Image (cartoon, helix red, strand yellow):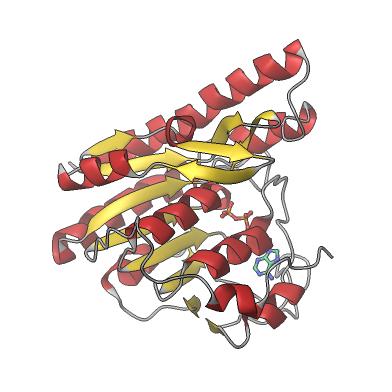
Amino acid sequence: MRKSNINKKEIKEIPINNKKNIGLSDLVVIKFGGSSITKKADNQFEMNYEVLNQSAEELYRAIKKTKYKVALICGVGPFGHTNVKKLNLNDGIKTREQEEGTQKTIVDCNFVAQETSTALEKFGLKTKIIPGYLVCKQDNRKAISFDTKEYVKAIHGGFIPITTGTMVKDKTLKWSVMSGDTAVAELCKQLRPRKVIMGTDVDGIYTADPKVNPKAKLIESITKENVPKILEMVGESNSVDVTGGMKGKLEKLALTLNGVPGEIFNLFTKGNLEKAFIGEEIKDTKIRL
Ligand code: ADP
């Protein structure tokens, strides 16, 4: 198991009011996990339209009830991970084949954004796709800048910005993978939303991967006190995932939530998204760091 590279001290030292803190208190940052809106478990280049359309409808209802603003981040599942793994795109782009694979991966990730936008617009929600490579720059797979101007502009203009995980420019590697979870973390750090809700294909974070270990127990609450211990337990993704799976997600959140409430829940369960959005109780993992 990979050791966690963050510790309690680091979590405490993040300043609450950094300069970029814009404080959009009526903003909800939402993640549609690749495991739920694509056929990630089967490793097929296919959207899961059933979950996507259901989620779009619930989102429409929830926004209507609350008037909260939304920024939506999508995982891309096989649309990103397959080629990244096959052509080794996250370890430095050196060949022509890798360069072409990078461009193809970008097109495939944009497809997920487009399909998500279409699903939301069917319910009259206005969307604005913001490709990750236009806002994020990385060095050695880590974000070194993430520009939120376009998000703020879109949100104030009544749009739901949509960004997917994708390939972005990398100072050292030429291109590298920006995961949807990185985008969630950056929006959270800079915009200070009222909450972050993340839909995946299991009920939350368990003591072990629930798809592998049937004895795994759902962790209902993650706090500053128990997060380092939980990070030691949590595994990576059960399907092809080059971005760290559940562990990567929690590590990024632990470094950025800093007071913003987070929730990880099952997007397959009808009603979950709407309830999480408006603040009703569901079976999930609640994070307060
Ligand atoms: P998404 O694509 O929805 O963002 P990931 O594939 O990155 O989700 O992570 C979710 C997967 O992580 C689950 O399908 C599960 O199999 C796996 N996983 C590994 N360890 C855990 C754990 N401790 N708790 C929950 N899920 C886990």
Q: Is residue 270 visible?
A: no
Residue 271 image-quadrant placement: bottom left
Vertical order, 233 against 22 (above or below)? below
Q: Indicate the position of residue 178 as horizontal and vertical percent values.
A: 58, 41
Q: Indicate the position of residue 92 as horizontal and vertical percent values.
A: 75, 29
Question: Which residue is rendered at x = 47% and y = 35% of the image?
Answer: 132
Vertical order, 121 against 225 (above or below)? above
Residue 283 shown left or right of residue 271 in the figure: right
Nearer the observer, 125 or 188: 188
Q: Indicate the position of residue 249 as horizontal and vertical percent values.
A: 59, 60
Q: Quadrant of the N terminus?
A: bottom right
Question: Which residue is rendered at x = 71% and y = 44% of the image?
Answer: 242
Vertical order, 15 against 139 (above or below)? below
Nearer the observer, 10 or 249: 10
Q: Is residue 233 visible?
A: yes
Question: Which residue is rendered at x = 63% and y = 86% of the image?
Answer: 226
Residue 244 image-quadrant placement: bottom right
Ligand 1 positioned in quadrant: bottom right
Residue 114 shown left or right of residue 222 in the figure: left
Nearer the observer, 11 or 80: 11
